[in-house]
Amino acid sequence: MRHLLKRVLLCALAYLPMASFSQNTEVETPYFRPFIHFTPQKNWMNDPNGLLFYKGQYHLYFQYNPFGNNWGHMSWGHATSPDLVNWAEHPVALREDSTMIFSGSLVYDTLNTSGFANTKDGCLVAIYTAHIEGKKQAQYLAYSTDGGMSFTKYGNNPVIDLGKRDFRDPNVFWHKSSAQWIMAVVLPLEYKVLFYGSKNLKEWSLLSEFANQGDLRKPWECPALIELPLEGSNTSKWVLMLSSNGSTQGYTGMQYFVGDFDGKTFINLHDAKQALYVDHGKDVYAGIPYNGLPKERATLIAWMTNLTYAGHTPTFPWRGQMTIPRRISLRNTAGGIRLVQNPLISSEYLSQLDVFEKENFKIKNSLDLSGNMLFANNAYLIDVELEVKSAKKVGFKIAQESDSVDNKKNIMETKVYYDIRKKGLILDRHKSSVMLHSQFPSIEQANYDLKNGILRLQILVDKTSVEVFANDGLTTMTDLIFPSEKAKRLSIFTENGKSLVKKLKIWNLQKYEKSKKK
């Protein structure tokens, strides 16, 4: 243990002492279980792995401890969904043996380039980092001939071994133009992405390197390279994403680069020192896109937490959840090409939910929406368009609990609002949680100008999380919250003036409880 306190934790757990993952609670917390965000039924979960759309199902593999809700015994858990909302969890797909099974990818080898398939339908191949504690990390293969339910480890592993202690997180996809498999994998401490090519997934050749650009404050992890459509055109660009985590002070989370990729080299189109961020909150990490989808349906899922307090989140018998799946694309802006994200909750699913709607009403100071029982359990999607007018601040107060003595004073709340003076969107979770950790309270800010004084927001609240999508998808903020069981009020507010709410829709996510009442 003393060695681990000095040694970095690897995969998505780099640079965090094992002691930070030692908090245990054995009191079940069903009121913290989200409705539409994936969580395992029990035990610890971190990075998404092997995201693959295959035969009508979205496969989600993830870093998993089969033996408890602290980090350790890294294996691949497994879940599937037909719609990215309703998930079925399956038995552990890849279990640790002499090595821990760290992060990686899953591909559908339709042409059987690997030779692993026993039918003409091809097979699924997992490419992952095998971690040998205190010695090294190398890239291994395993294959599945039963649709991803179980895997056989390749007998001639490893397929890439540099003899390094920090060499991980292979992201693999088929590159049609060069007719080869491409792997992006990182040397975290060297701030370097290595690109490899292979015709058969077994034999790999180094193609190029990408290094020392963007945000270099924390080591690089979990690379993902994907081609995305550029909105309003018939063209596309490539996006390279990287994760770096640690203290909420100087927090990085996920950064991205926009560029060109020719099957060998990735060229960043922006200044090498410029850092662009996937999310402006504190709780998005290790996100990767789905394989098996066309670029027009590109979909990203990330682990929703911060390594500083990941082991202290007060949930049991599980620990860890994923973000809502996000449709991603690119858009030309005055500042250059930027990533666009929107929550993927199908209109078909929303049509089955109870909804509150109201249009064209003025708001000054505060309007309590809690009289509508739809919002009584902190699980809803807000879609709002409002005209700021004279207000200096306007937004929502979420998961509020009033002081028992002074009912006008909140002892718990999470605020999401636009600040006119700062020209920024704010997410304030200083009073949002029962979790006691010095670095959990925070205020996030993302600056952008409103168009004609109109603020449009989508705010997804699901028990222990708030995800905000603003600026037509160009600005996202994601934070965990852990409100008390009494903190259930929702209100819309202004400060120092009035605003006009043009359209407001709020869906109750508690579909299943609604069904039971019928």
Image (cartoon, rainbow, N blue to C red):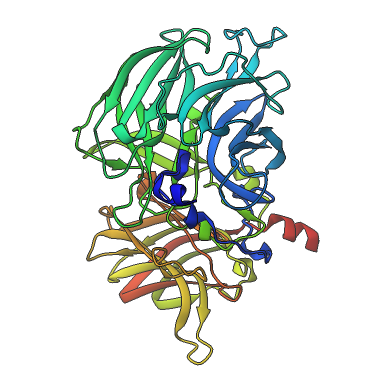
**Residue 308 drawn at (x, y percent):** 42, 55
Q: Is residue 286 left or right of residue 387?
A: right
Compare residues 150 and 366 and report the one nearer the observer.
150
Residue that appears at 52% across and 60% down:
312
- Vertical position of residue 291 compared to residue 283: above or below: above
Q: Is residue 343 left or right of residue 69?
A: left
Return the residue found at the far front: 2
**Residue 18 drawn at (x, y percent):** 48, 51
Residue that appears at 54% across and 22% down:
140
Residue that appears at 62% across and 64% down:
25
Q: Is residue 228 left or right of residue 58?
A: left
Q: Is residue 233 visible?
A: no
Compare residues 338 and 17 and report the one nearer the observer.
17
Return the residue found at the far bottom: 405
Q: Is residue 486 visible?
A: yes
Compare residues 494 and 70 and report the one nearer the observer.
70
Residue that appears at 34% across and 27% down:
193
Label count reads 0
- Vertical position of residue 307 compared to residue 348: above or below: below
Q: Is residue 167 left or right of residue 1?
A: left
**Residue 319 drawn at (x, y percent):** 59, 54
**Residue 398 drawn at (x, y percent):** 49, 68
